[in-house]
């Protein structure tokens, strides 16, 4: 049993998932020959997704103050490579982007999520 936020790139469950297909296409285009199972690449991709969201929220005001303000104002952002139900939420006082996780158990060939999303920010 493990707690995680990410869909597993090797798990056939996500083979036809649009978020994982987009990640694979990005990976093949920009990182040909690299090891897609290296989780650091997925982390970087997810950071890029979140940066894109922050910049969209900024609109035409790309001042430092507004960028920081928008980074601390992410509300229920879905990162396509995260497990279903996992959302990113930030506030003025909570800068940690991953406050949720899902428990999973290995079935021998895939990971199967069970239970509800666990959220460190819930009371």
Image (cartoon, rainbow, N blue to C red):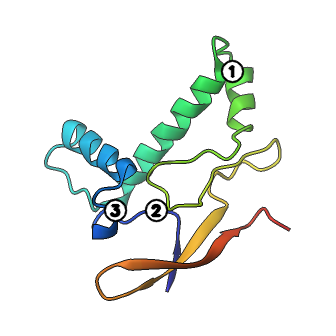
Q: CA distance from mark 2 to mark 3?
A: 11 Å
Marking on residue 14? 3
Q: Quadrant of residue 117?
A: bottom right
Q: Give how far across and how far down residue 31 sits, in percent.
A: 22, 42
Question: SS class of the residue under badge 1?
Answer: helix
Q: Which of pointers 2 and 1 indicates the residue nearer the eye?
A: 2
Q: Residue at x 52, y 64 (%)?
A: 5
In the displayed structure, 115 sits above or below 10; it is below
Q: CA distance from mark 2 to mark 1?
A: 30 Å
Q: Residue at x 33, y 68 (%)?
A: 13
Residue on which the image places disc 1: 64
Q: Quadrant of residue 106?
A: bottom left
Q: Quadrant of residue 74?
A: top right
Q: Earlier in the sequence, mark 2 or mark 3?
A: 2
Q: Residue at x 74, y 38 (%)?
A: 72
Is residue 11 among what the camera can see? no
In the displayed structure, 71 sits above or below 123; it is above
- Circle 3 packing at 10 Å, graded few (<14), some (14-19), many (20+), is some
Image-based side of 11 in relation to 82, left or right: left
Q: Give how far across and how far down residue 46 sits, in percent.
A: 46, 46
Image-based side of 33 in relation to 49, left or right: left
Q: Earlier in the sequence, mark 2 or mark 1?
A: 2
Q: Give how far across and how far down residue 15 sits, in percent.
A: 28, 60
In which quadrant will I find the C terminus?
A: bottom right
In the displayed structure, 88 sits above or below 56; it is below
Residue on which the image places disc 2: 6
């Amino acid at each position: 049993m493990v707690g995680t936020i990410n869909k597993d790139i090797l798990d056939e469950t996500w083979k036809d998932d649009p978020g994982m297909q987009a990640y694979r296409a990005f990976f093949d285009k920009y990182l040909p020959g690299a090891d897609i199972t290296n989780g650091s690449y997925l982390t970087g991709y997810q950071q890029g997704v979140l940066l894109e969201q922050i910049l969209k929220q900024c609109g035409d005001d790309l001042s430092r103050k507004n960028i920081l303000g928008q980074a601390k104002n992410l509300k229920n952002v879905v990162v396509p490579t995260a497990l279903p139900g996992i959302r990113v939420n930030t506030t003025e006082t909570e800068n940690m982007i991953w406050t949720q996780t899902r428990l999973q158990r290995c079935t021998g060939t895939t990971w199967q999520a069970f239970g509800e999303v666990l959220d460190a920010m819930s009371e």
